[in-house]
């Protein structure tokens, strides 16, 4: 008996046109019969599996390709109907792959079989390899054929030759069609210490993007081959954020997130690794990523300089925030009294449980006050926000110029202030590694110097 806890193996059968009366063509029959062969083989091995029949209803057709394949498979006893899933949006091979992957991810499946015609396989495989990361999925490809006369064969070959160079374009063309999977618009939180007449800035939440996997939905802004999200999804999320917050997505620079204390001054040669960026160029929008780690924004409205830092616990211990201040004061001649800092959503002292060794390191670096003992909890907790504040105050920053959620001057509701706990936010508005595990999404804090006469702020009202 198949293990109910093991994700099923998936079989994706790519659709093609039907006959005028909605019956399957010989080509469609060969594909579904091929899929049935794979299905039967897995069943004989007692492997739980599902068949995704993918294909839309073309203009003039009486039935969708997916429905036609399902009907043929069921009427002929080829595949059990309860194991067939219809995907009826896809109008191209790229869409077959894209929308089928969403279904595969709903099952947390990793083993995927792709079934199509022999002449179509090269292009299909190229597309699927772009959409299904080999770091996550184990792919198998099964090609089948049907009887064709010379004219049909020539037509098929010409079609493949025409569309093969357009693979990347076809994948990109999916993006504008996508609706919001969570049904919510982009939400950006802003700090009152950063002057909005000089800087365009914000801290993103998880809402308003196109990423669909449950822990990555929906405005995931950093791509990794190890996560169930596509690079084109992340690119589209960044494009939509740029449109909302009025910056150029092609000049959007994000810190590398390597948990060290290296800083890149934008315009200098780019180092291999860095957790913070600094610029005085109004064309560049800089950002720091986080999914529990604090994202920290810096600015000097007098010298018109801004910075963004990924200040995880290792980076905080390595004094990355002090490193940013040092470069602002030396390279850009900023005065300490003019520097302002906002700490974005991050894991709070309520949730950041650590080992005794980490707690001891924070006590030594900042003082015992940053280590929190919670009643009934054997392990200590660390206050990253306070650690960053103490680091900055030691550099001479004015306490009132640091926004870490403790200001009594900010009269907005707490939920609208940028410093929130990513893990225990009651509405789960933020991505959190501690809560979501390895398939976590990433939000960012971003900032850009405005151009004086023809610039505007985020369109988030």
Image (cartoon, grey):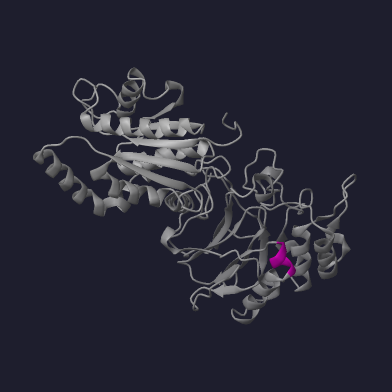
Residue at position x 24%, y 25% in the image: 24
Q: Nearer the viewer, residue 345 or 109?
A: 109
Residue 243 visible to the viewer: yes
Q: Residue at x 48, y 42 (%)?
A: 111
Magenta-colored segment: predominant secondary structure: helix
Q: Examine the structure image and report whether residue 104 is included in the region drawn in magenta.
A: no
Residue located at (43% from left, 28% from top): 85
Between 180 and 68, the one nearer to me in the picture: 68
- Residue 27 x/y as whole percent: 23, 33
Q: Is residue 441 left or right of residue 9?
A: right
User: Relative to 299, does residue 108 appear above or below in the rendering?
Assistant: above
* Relative image position of residue 378 (x, y in whole percent): 88, 50
Question: Which of the 4 image quarters holds residue 335?
Answer: bottom right
How many numbered marks does the figure carry? 0
Span shown in magenta: 313-317
The residue drawn where x is 43% and y is 22% is: 80
Front position in the image: 211 or 245: 211
The residue lying furthest to the left in this view is: 151
Q: Position of residue 388 (x, y in %)?
A: 74, 64
User: Which of the image's four quarters has the N terminus?
Assistant: top right
The x and y percentages for residue 323 are: 67, 74
């Amino acid at each position: 008996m198949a293990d109910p806890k093991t994700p099923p193996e998936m079989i994706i059968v790519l659709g093609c046109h039907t006959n005028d009366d909605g019956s399957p063509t010989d080509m469609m029959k060969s594909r579904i019969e091929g899929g049935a062969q794979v299905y039967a083989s897995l069943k004989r091995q007692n492997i739980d599996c599902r068949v995704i029949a993918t294909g839309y209803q073309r203009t003039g057709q009486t039935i969708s390709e997916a429905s036609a394949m399902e009907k043929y498979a069921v009427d002929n006893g080829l595949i059990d109907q309860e194991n067939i899933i219809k995907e009826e949006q896809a109008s191209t091979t790229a869409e077959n792959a894209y929308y089928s992957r969403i279904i595969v991810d709903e099952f947390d499946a990793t083993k995927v079989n792709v079934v199509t015609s022999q002449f179509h396989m090269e292009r299909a495989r190229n597309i699927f390899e772009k959409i299904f990361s080999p770091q996550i999925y184990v792919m198998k490809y099964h090609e089948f054929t049907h009887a064709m006369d010379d004219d049909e064969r020539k037509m098929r070959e010409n079609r493949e030759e025409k569309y093969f160079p357009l693979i990347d374009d076809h994948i990109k063309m999916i993006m504008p069609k996508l609706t919001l999977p969570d049904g919510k618009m982009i939400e950006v939180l802003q700090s009152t210490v950063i002057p909005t007449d000089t800087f365009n800035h914000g801290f993103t939440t998880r809402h308003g993007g196109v990423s669909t996997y449950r822990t990555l939905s929906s405005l995931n802004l950093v791509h990794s081959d190890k996560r169930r999200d596509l690079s084109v999804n992340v690119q589209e999320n960044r494009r939509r954020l740029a449109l909302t917050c009025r910056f150029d997505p092609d000049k959007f620079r994000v810190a590398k997130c390597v948990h060290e204390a290296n800083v890149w001054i934008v315009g200098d040669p780019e180092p291999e690794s860095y957790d913070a960026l600094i610029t005085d160029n109004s064309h560049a929008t800089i950002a720091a990523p986080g999914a529990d780690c604090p994202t920290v924004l810096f600015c000097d409205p007098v010298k018109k300089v801004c910075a963004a830092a990924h200040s995880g616990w290792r980076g905080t211990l390595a004094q990355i925030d002090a490193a940013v201040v040092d470069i602002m004061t030396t390279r850009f001649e900023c005065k300490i009294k003019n520097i302002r800092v906002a700490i974005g959503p991050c894991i709070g002292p309520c949730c950041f449980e650590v080992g005794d060794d980490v707690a001891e390191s924070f006590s030594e670096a900042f003082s015992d006050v940053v280590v929190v003992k919670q009643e009934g909890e054997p392990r200590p907790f660390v206050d990253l926000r306070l650690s960053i504040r103490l680091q900055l105050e030691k550099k001479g920053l004015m306490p009132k110029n640091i926004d870490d959620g403790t200001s009594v001057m900010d009269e907005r509701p707490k939920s609208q202030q940028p410093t929130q706990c990513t893990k225990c936010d009651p509405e789960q508005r933020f991505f959190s590694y501690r809560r979501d595990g390895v398939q976590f999404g990433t939000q960012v804090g971003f900032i850009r110097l405005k151009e004086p006469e023809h610039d505007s702020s985020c369109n988030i009202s």
